[in-house]
C-alpha cells in the first residue's frame, strides 16, 4: 500500500496501524502528534487505527519551550 507521509509517497507492507508506522520510524518515545486525512488521532488510538491505501499522514514533533 502507499500513503502520503508528510507530503512524500511512502510504501508500507501489510495492514499497518499508526503504532506500527510510528515504531518503524523509531518515534515511539518521542512527543509527536499524528494526523490522518486531516484528523488528529489521539495516542490512545494509535494501536487501533489501521492505515489504508492513499491515506495522508502527517507526523509532527512537539517542541517545548518558554
Image (cartoon, grey):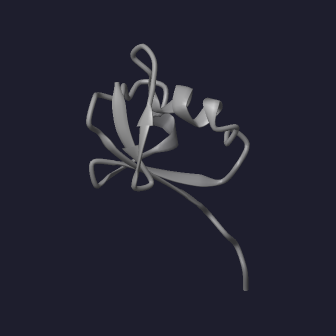
Give the residue at x 73% y 42%. Answer: 29
The percent position of residue 26, horizontal first and vertical second, equals: 70, 37
Q: Position of residue 17 (x, y in %)?
A: 44, 25
Q: Position of residue 28 (x, y in %)?
A: 68, 38
From the image, which quarter does the N terminus lie in? top left
Q: Nearer the viewer, residue 44 or 28?
A: 28
Looking at the image, residue 5 lies above or below residue 50: below
**Residue under the point 63% across and 38% down:** 25
Residue farthest to the top, as pictured: 14
Corner quadrant of residue 15: top left
Seen in the image, is 20 located left or right of residue 54?
right
x 50%, y 36%: residue: 44
Is 50 above or below relative to 43?
above
Which residue is rendered at x = 39% and y = 55% of the image?
7
Position above or below: 44 against 61: above
Position of residue 25 in the picture relative to residue 5 (left or right): right
Q: Is residue 63 shown above or below 46?
A: below
The quadrant in which the C terminus is found is: bottom right
Across the whole image, how many numbered discs are drawn on residues?
Answer: 0
Quadrant assignment, res 48:
top left
> Which residue occupies the extreme bottom position in the image?
66
**Where residue 18 sits in the image (x, y, percent)?**
47, 33
Between 9 and 54, which is closer to the camera in this rendering?
9
Q: Nearer the viewer, residue 41 or 1?
A: 1
Side of 37 relative to 6 (left or right): left
Amino acid at each position: 500500500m502507499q500513503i502520503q507521509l508528510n507530503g512524500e509517497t511512502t510504501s508500507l507492507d501489510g495492514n499497518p496501524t499508526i503504532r506500527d508506522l510510528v515504531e518503524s520510524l523509531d518515534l515511539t518515545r518521542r512527543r509527536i502528534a499524528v494526523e490522518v486525512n486531516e484528523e488528529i488521532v489521539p495516542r490512545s488510538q494509535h494501536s487501533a487505527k489501521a492505515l489504508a491505501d492513499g491515506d495522508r499522514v502527517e507526523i509532527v514533533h512537539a517542541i517545548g519551550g518558554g
